[in-house]
Amino acid sequence: RKEVEQDPGPFNVPEGATVAFNCTYSNSASQSFFWYRQDCRKEPKLLMSVYSSGNEDGRFTAQLNRASQYISLLIRDSKLSDSATYLCVVRESGGSNYKLTFGKGTLLTVNP
Amino acid sequence: NAGVTQTPKFRILKIGQSMTLQCTQDMNHNYMYWYRQDPGMGLKLIYYSVGAGITDKGEVPNGYNVSRSTTEDFPLRLELAAPSQTSVYFCASSYDAGGEAFFGQGTRLTVV
């Protein structure tokens, strides 16, 4: 089983749509969770951390379900500028706590 | 506000050649990382460092070497380049193991 698995995508949605991305992780000892955004031919950048209680940043909402080892990202009122690849990222705990494990990413295209 | 700077941005190598990818950060971060990203794949950790003088292998270290003589610099050395090393290489840094990782703009390497 892959360590971090994401919806394969791609997602094509119209402006204003709501879109949700899902991610599962295999290591139950994982400690920290993030969503990164990567524009085409650019470096990844942190979009938001994911907290156990869930968290929201404007149009973006992240949820964590530790029991199911599941992370989600919801984007409301999609904008053209949201078009990018969204990377689910998990940090393990203990001896490997340096390690950030990246999912393959889900490509989102928002159409006018 | 430089952040993480990588050079070169692009490079074509012939099989068997060697080169060093440079990475420097001005944020006084302890942790530095080298990742490679192949098309359609997640980022894979090559090497990482938790401070000057300390380095360790990641998931895919074969064919690479690193050094960390200063806090700022973390060069990646490719010896005897092979076509399998064609990839985009990202250097990243973070203040600690759990914090946000800041990425350089990447080096696109082609081995022919």
Image: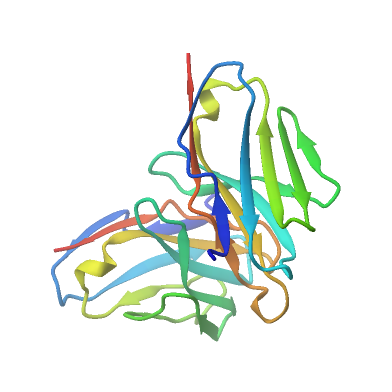
> Where does the image place residue A13, in percent across and percent down from the top left?
52, 22
Q: Nearer the viewer, residue A5 or A40?
A: A5
In the image, what residue occupies the spot 68% across and 25% down?
Answer: A76
In the image, what residue occupies the spot 28% across and 68% down?
Answer: B85
In the image, what residue occupies the spot 80% across and 51% down?
Answer: A51
Q: Hey, which residue is sitting farthest top in the picture? A: A112
> Where does the image place residue B39, in percent across and percent down from the top left?
34, 52
In the depicted structure, whether residue B75 falls above or below residue A37:
below
Q: Nearer the viewer, residue B74 or B97?
A: B97
The answer to which image quadrant residue A41 occupies is top left
The answer to which image quadrant residue A18 occupies is top right
> Where does the image place residue B72, in percent across and percent down from the top left?
53, 69
Using residue B78 as the reference point, say whether residue B69 is left or right of it. Answer: right
Q: Hey, which residue is sitting farthest right in the picture? A: A53
Q: Hey, which residue is sitting farthest bottom in the picture? A: B53
In the depicted structure, whether residue A86 falls above or below residue A12:
below
In the depicted structure, whether residue A29 falls above or below residue B107:
below
Q: What is the image's colouring?
A: rainbow
